Image (cartoon, rainbow, N blue to C red):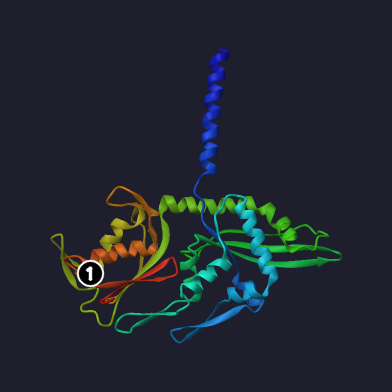
Amino acid sequence: MGKRMKTLSLALLMIFGLSIIGFSQAKKPILMVVPSDVWCNQNGYMLEYDNQGVKVKVPDYKRALQENADLLLVISKINELMAARGFPLKNLESSLKSLESESAEESMLTSKSGAGISESPIDKLKKVAKADIWLQVTWTVNQTGPKKSVTFNLQGLDAYSDKQVAGASGTGNPSFSAALPVLLEEAVLAHLDNFNAQLQSHFDDMFANGREVKVLVKMWDSATGDLETEYEVNGETLELLEAIKHWMDDNCKNGRYSNTDATATMARYEQVRIPMTITDDKGRERAIDTRAFVSNLRKYLSGPPFNLTSKVYMRGLGEAWLIIGEK
């Protein structure tokens, strides 16, 4: 009996150990820490860009990093805390340098006919950084006599959908320490485990139900026909819009998406759930992103019976436009 109990105990320990290893090796989202829009606005770190004739304000991360030493300390401390918990990180400063070196600062992309589409500086940065979740941080230092404390607000935003998926806020205990990183760590630590659990839960949901993105189908002015043009598809007469709907039904994760608007020249799809990975023709599993997903739609429409020329244009990571009529 004792021997059987020992064998059973050993088996249970092995199962428990494997579960712990599997949990610790679970894929985690890639994070990037940035100052919040509120913090940037309060401290004067905003810039304007021309969005097709409309002036829009966005955070000026580059100037904030160059001029505000506290920001570097805060980002460094949160990076340190998250890295210690196994989260892979992208560095904001390095991503901004990559943005410049790749000449991604150009705000306009034109078709061969000269038609243009604008893209915000933040959308460009998202494409270069390729982080799954942006951690937006806001903080203030409080002074009570000789003691100081930090009040913080940490938001986890899905880089593809811009939706908040995790949040934490609080104020640390007053301390005689004057070092901002120490004060911040004291304030954040009590909330970090719950915050990280929210991040991981969101990431796990993406694997189970797909990543949420947006897709916009448009027609160049030079296009012949429109979304109401009819085609014979597998023996069935379908408008182009209906054929695209059938493709979305087949290719979205669990068929999940919303067609929020449609006209003869435009179709808007939101809450589009794309799979995190797909299996290619050789049986290999590979990651898929918004561009790859919409490129597959472009390839479908380039073949018979449609034979349409189109261009995929990205707005950040989570929104793709398929513009039909030319490249």
Q: Residue 257 versus residue 7: which sits nearer the camera?
A: 7
Q: Is residue 288 visible?
A: yes
Residue 252 at x, y percent in the picture: 34, 57
The residue sitting at the left extreme is 235
Identify whether 210 is placed above or below 219. Answer: above
For label 1, count other residues whose C-alpha is less than 10 Å away and answer few (under 14), some (14-19) or many (20+): many
Residue 293 at x, y percent in the picture: 34, 61
Would residue 266 be found to the left or right of residue 139 on screen? Answer: left
Amino acid identity at mark 1: Leu
Identify whether 222 is placed above or below 301. Answer: below
Identify whether 322 is placed above or below 31. Answer: below
The residue sitting at the right extreme is 145
The quarter of the rendered structure image containing the N terminus is top right
Identify the residue at image location x=37%, y=65%.
Answer: 291
The residue sitting at the front extreme is 101
Q: Is residue 243 visible?
A: no
Identify the residue at image location x=81%, y=67%.
Answer: 143
Identify the residue at image location x=50%, y=65%.
Answer: 129
Q: Residue 156 versus residue 88: which sits nearer the camera?
A: 88
Residue 304 at x, y percent in the picture: 17, 65
Residue 225 at x, y percent in the picture: 21, 77
**Quadrant of the rendered image containing residue 258:** bottom left
The quarter of the rendered structure image containing the C terminus is bottom left
Identify the residue at image location x=50%, y=75%.
Answer: 121
Q: Residue 102 versus residue 281: which sits nearer the camera?
A: 102
Q: Which residue is mark 1?
A: 240
Would residue 57 be found to the left or right of residue 257 on screen? Answer: right
